[in-house]
Image (spheres, coloured by chain):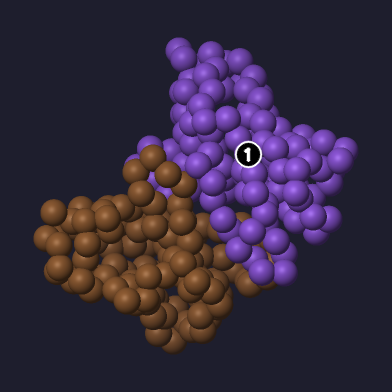
Amino acid sequence: EAGVAQSPRYKIIEKRQSVAFWCNPISGHATLYWYQQILGQGPKLLIQFQNNGVVDDSQLPKDRFSAERLKGVDSTLKIQPAKLEDSAVYLCASSPEFATNEKLFFGSGTQLSVL
Amino acid sequence: DAKTTQPNSMESNEEEPVHLPCNHSTISGTDYIHWYRQLPSQGPEYVIHGLTSNVNNRMASLAIAEDRKSSTLILHRATLRDAAVYYCILRETSYDKVIFGPGTSLSVIP
């Protein structure tokens, strides 16, 4: 079974530039999550999708971050404009169902450095 | 969101058992206890979960206190590959959020 795919693996940009991350969840998984992990901290949930609808985006800085999940499959997370404090690893995860105790499957993440 | 408390770091000798504690004194009756671990430069991976009874799988065992206010992840024989950050998480079934704390960084000494 193929895992959660994320790209790019690394990205270096200057502040005020824009950047986009892509995630392809495990086939058939209805729920998709984006997390931000700053060095030395646990992952922080940014947004959660159920199919192509947003379930929770309370921690997403909506003035600069946006995310979409077209057709309930792939997802893109965008930052525009980036700030220095956005330097982090961005993790995508998926699970088969919503509101169950299914385990989450994580990708390897995209490491973003904002200079 | 439900809260958990874990030690920041622990050490273990290789091939010895490791007991990783987690306190969750505000747990509600329907919250499941989940454990994930994160190896260096990788995303977290699921380890085990339980509700009331102790659980075993090929990776680890989960011992849950009778009052459910604490739990312990048990690695029966630590290997160098078990060096990772271990996260104890309470999952609120009604909202299905997976909220990570800082976790416990486990070092395994050869």
For label 1, the crowd category at 10 Å Cα-Cα, with few meaning under 14, some 14 to 19 and many 20 or more, is some
Residue at 54% over, 46% down? B101
Please name whichever residue, A67 or B110, is drawn nearer the observer in this view of the structure.
A67
Residue B24 position within the rendered picture, expressed as x and y whole percent measured from the top left: 71, 43
- Depicted B21 relative to depicted B97: above or below: above
State left or right for residue A99 relative to residue A84: right
| Residue A76, picture quadrant | bottom left
Residue B61 visible in the picture: no
- Depicted A99 relative to depicted A10: above or below: below
Residue B48 position within the rendered picture, expressed as x and y whole percent measured from the top left: 66, 45
Please name whichever residue, A58 or B94, is drawn nearer the observer in this view of the structure.
A58
Residue B39 position within the rendered picture, expressed as x and y whole percent measured from the top left: 43, 38
Residue A65 position within the rendered picture, expressed as x and y whole percent measured from the top left: 33, 73
| Residue A3, picture quadrant | bottom left
**SS of the residue at dot 1?**
loop
Q: Chain of mark 1?
A: B
Chain drawn brown in the picture: A
> What hue does chain B carry in this figure?
purple
- The extreme bottom residue here reads A71
State left or right for residue B28 relative to residue A89: right
Q: Which residue is mark 1?
A: B5
Q: Quadrant of the C terminus of chain A?
A: bottom left
State left or right for residue A72 relative to residue B26: left
Residue at 64% over, 19% down? B17
Q: Indicate the amino acid at tag 1.
A: Thr
